[in-house]
Image: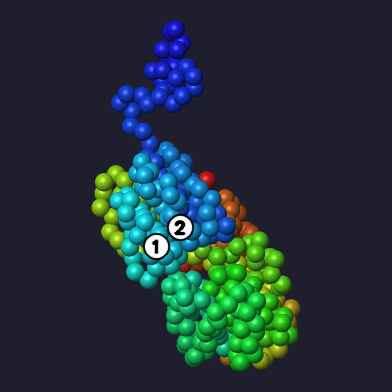
Amino acid sequence: MRNSTFKQRNGVAPAGRLVLVAGVKPPPKVALLIETSNSYARELLQGVRAWVREKGPWLLRLTEQGRGAAVPSWLRGWDGNGVIARVENGRIARALRATRLPVIDVSAALPRLVFPRVATDARVAAQLAATHLIERGLRHFAYCGDPRSNWSRLRGEMFAIATRPIGGHCARFSPPAGGVDEEVEAIARWLRRLRRPVGILACLDVRGQQVLAACQLVGLKVPDEVAVIGVHNDTTLCELCDPPLSSVMPNAQRAGYEAAALLARAMAGRKIAVKLHEVAPLGVASRKSTDLAAVGDAKVARIVRYMREQAAGGVNVSDVLRAVPMARTALERRFKTALGMTPHTYLRRLRIERVQELLVRTNLPVGEIALATGFEHTEYLSAMFRRECGLRPRDYRARHRLKH
């Protein structure tokens, strides 16, 4: 009898039922209306999980659903405290407003904000893609999106702005009404009309896969004639593409974490403004679909390839000249004509990109990252990184990476 009383006082009934302890506030109940069918959404969920482990607990309710699926019927009478949702259309928005619960939107589908929203920074994503293609010597650009989606339209507008100083007009694809096969055929016809070589940003990796399939359909060489980069870096999908697809890496885990933090404040009774909270992407995962040096100068193209292969090893301009012999003044002049920057600047960018990747993707100390990327001294890496990125390496890691 004494043991039974002890269990009941500590929240465990003799039959194993959960018993609320007097004076102990139960954890908030939170619904996650987020699909699990793509990597971005799964990483959003990982970000929510990271916040709950750090600040929780929450009682989470997640049901299997597809993107844009109707709000589940159980939500109407659900005795919960808040919702994090992918608000993909007006129907979902209206159903969520009817609950009168705090809601955080983790989709950029609707052109008008209905709830506080956490989403990828479209301008930074487009700029990363544009810079990646420009550094490969491309001067003609196009965007393959879906004008029916707000986030796709915005991404296309930002890409056009980012490439305007280099390429002028940015061609855009308008999909026909029909299925996937009809879209691939329409993309193929569109590709034939573009000036080549061309760098194409696809609104998502799955659209990038369609662009690559269309290139095969009409015999266009990737990346020599058409270089393709997607968004979201769905690793499995990107590696299944032929050739493997380069992609902008969002920071979806950070977005999920920020959404959870906002919802916690709302559930605590604090007023949360209906505004957009943007999360910058992490960088670009470079694969064979953009592995080219599209410059008319064959020797500079060879040098660029060498730099990409060796930059992380700490090569300098002198090493480059030994590998591809030519006069230093000629290299400087020809490189700047072809790519608009000096060889030294290009090498520095490549190394900083690798440092950023290691800071976010690994637990390596900054000293070990310095050695792995060709910096002899940690202090020199820190000074250069702060000059290029505006943050110290440890601050960059703290801003972009979550604790697990």
Q: Amino acid at mark 2?
A: Ala
Q: Residue at x 30, y 51 (%)?
A: 100
Residue 104 vertical placement versus 225 (above, below): above
Depth check: give the residue in front, 196 or 107: 107
**Image quarter in which the N terminus is found:** top left
- Residue 336 at least partly seen: no
The kind of secondary structure element at disc 1 is helix
Left or right? Give the position of 15 relative to 300.
left
Whether tag 1 and tag 2 are in contact, CB under 8 A, the answer is: yes
Q: Residue at x 71, y 89 (%)?
A: 298
Q: Which mark is residue 91?
A: 1
The residue beneath circle 2 is 70
C-alpha gap between disc 1 and disc 2 = 8 Å
Depth check: give the residue in front, 332 or 403: 403
The kind of secondary structure element at disc 2 is loop
Q: Earlier in the sequence, mark 1 or mark 2?
A: 2
Q: Amino acid at mark 1?
A: Arg
Q: Residues within 10 Å of mark 1 (few under 14, many from 20)?
A: few
Depth check: give the residue in front, 105 or 300: 105
